[in-house]
Structures are given as C-alpha cells and as structure tokens.
Image (cartoon, rainbow, N blue to C red):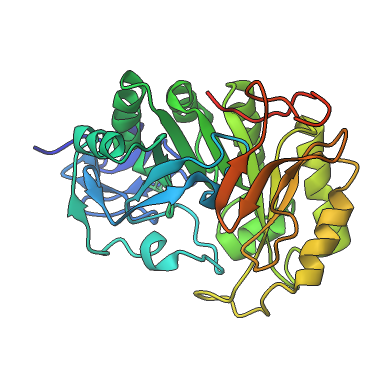
Amino acid sequence: MMITAAWWRPLDNGQVACDLCPIACRLREGQTGPCATRANHEGTMVPLHYGRIVSSAIDPIEKKPLYHFHPGSPILSVAAPGCNLHCMFCQNWNISQNGEARTLKTSPTDLVAMAQAEESVGIAFTYSEPLVWYEFVKDTAGIVREKGLKNVLVTNGYLNPEPLAELLPLIDAANIDLKSMDDVFYRKICKARLEPVLASIRQFREAGVHLEITNLLIPGHNDRDDQITALVDFVAGLDQDIPLHFSAYHPAWKLNAQPTPPATLQRARELAAGKLKYVYLGNTNSSEGRDTVCPDCGTVVVERSGYRGVGKLTDGDRCPGCGARIPVVVN
Ligand code: SF4
C-alpha cells in the first residue's frame, strides 16, 4: 500500500510543493527531493522510506550523545537513508547522502517490539536525518509513547515550525547539531540556512523537550574563538543548564580539513567555562570532558568510561556531595 506524505500541496501544473522543510521544493512528476526521502508520484507526494531502515543498533544513550537523559541506558537506534542538508563534512554520508542505500523492511510495531525485547529505554531516530523520515518517525513515536518508552531525535533541526509543532509532543529528548552561528557556513558547507535551525532549537525548548546541543569543531571552518563564543552565548542565552557537546571532526566525504586537535576541544571548553554549566568533549580518546560534575561542589555525579555512564546521583537527581539538583532526566 502506498503511503501519502504529510505536509505537501498539489500545484496546478502537476507539480507538488513540499512544506516539510525550509528548502521548500517544487517537485515535477517523478522527481525526488534533494533529501532523497520524498518524491512526486503521479501528482502525490510520497515518503520513500516509510517502513524501511538502513541502520539499527542498540547503543548506549551516551553515544547519541545524550548525557543528561537516562544515563547508562541502552537505546534502540534506527535510521533511514537521506538528509535535507548536504554538509561537506558529513560523518555519516554513506547513509545520509545515499538515497539508494540498501534498506530492510520494518514497521512501527516491529520496531517498538524490538525496543521492548532489548529492554531499551526507547527509540532514537538518529545516524541520518530523522525529521525528513517524518511520517514513519511520527507513527512509530506514537506507539513508543503508548508502551511507556521514550522517543529521542538526533537531528539537524531543519524543519518548518508547523510540522515540528505536530511532532514535538511525542518527543522526549533531542540532541540538535548546531554546526556554526555563521549563516555563510550553513550556506556554503551545508546548503542550508542558520536561522531555521536556531528557531527549531527554541521551539524544542519551548515544547519542553529535553535538549542537548552538539557542535562539531572543524579546523579552519568554525573553530575561531569568536565563532565558538557566539555559539556558547546562544546556548547560554537559552539556558545555562543545556549540555553542550564539542565534538572532534575527522575528514569525511567532501571535506578534507585536518582532524580537530585535542587543544581545540580544550580551548572550546575553556571559552564556555563560566557561561555553561555542562560542557562535554566527544569523538576523542581523552577522558577529559566526559564526566558530569556538580557545578556547585565539583563532585562527579555521572562517571563515564567510553560511552558507558554510571550515575552516582541520589534521590534521582541530587548531587551526592552537596545535595544540589542536577538537571539529569532519570524517569
Ligand atoms: S523535505 Fe525534502 S522534498 Fe521537502 S522541502 Fe525539504 S528537501 Fe525538499
């Protein structure tokens, strides 16, 4: 049975207009959007990967990365091919930029049953771009909720506000990739714009979704002090408690910059000190910037080794050293 996509309009000339993301495609008969997830089929917009997965794994939730949401929990992580951004440095380009990638058939109920069988805390829609897998994510997320499990998005945040508003009541936690505070970076390197991403971040927050932010630091592209400071200031302006993950870049796809030196990660962390309470360093072998530390007394409240987190909180979310509340979601 063919599924019809959400958020599109037929046009007079047989084309269809997509209202899902800010790219605002007009697709001719037979044409697929640049996201490789939606196509005009005989004047109707259809989602191409409904019930198809390209990757699945049980990951530690820390790998998303989410450090303040059910630390130490396993989560079923799934993806379909495609993405509406085309970041030259994409670390998952083999699935995000390959609409033809081989997929396996599944269904919302099958995935939720798998999550339950694996004693997963829920389902993470991740690896490629879940927001343009919209119809399947929404249908699955509804069943996840019915079963008392959690829905997680790892996303670029590039969606129009109306479809996002419809999805967010089902979402428990998200890690949004904020690639830069520079619109030129978004235009040149990602073929997108900055402002819709910032608007989405605000929208996730206002909807009460647990939010963490990741910034991949790419030498020579977004790692100057003023660029890092602008990003830190934006996040701190929303809430000092939002965890910010600075992540190391490794050359991938179309960008061949040098890998992020450990000193750059350290410098980013120092620039954020005093502005944000929880700053982490990822994609690196160093153990620095991994643990969650109480900002009041310095006690380690979640200890991490690799991607494994061990919580030491008392009464759910209290520091065992001084009793301060730590913004970690455990229920
Ligand atoms: S979701 Fe895909 S088809 Fe729709 S506007 Fe965005 S890129 Fe175009």
Q: Quadrant of residue 287?
A: bottom right
Instruction: Pick whichever, 254 or 95, lies toward us.
Output: 95
Return the x and y of residue 226 as percentages of the image width and height.
87, 57
Give the x, y percent position of residue 95.
37, 62
Label total for image: 0
Instruction: Give the camera-side residue of 3 and 239.
Output: 239
Against 219, residue 109 (above or below) is: above
Q: Quadrant of residue 107?
A: top left
- The image shows residue 244 at horizontal and vertical percentages of 71, 45
Q: Residue furthest right?
A: 274
Position of 58 compared to 221: left or right? left
Question: Horizontally, is 208 left or right of 44 in the view?
Answer: right
Residue 267, placed above or below residue 4: below
Q: In this rendering, is residue 245 above or below 122?
A: below
Q: Is residue 107 visible?
A: yes
* Residue 185 picture quarter: bottom right
- Taking the image as shown, residue 128 lies to the left or right of residue 275, namely left
> Does residue 9 appear in the picture of this structure?
no
Q: Where 199 falls versus 81 (above or below)?
A: above
Name the quarter where the N terminus is drawn: top left
Taking the spot 50% from the left edge, 28% from the top edge, the residue there is 172
Question: Residue 240's spot in the image, x, y percent?
Answer: 80, 33
Seen from the viewer's position, the closer of residues 245 and 12 is 245
Q: Residue at x 44, y 29 (%)?
A: 163
- Which residue is outermost to the left? 1
Residue drawn at (74%, 51%), measured in percent from left and top?
Answer: 181
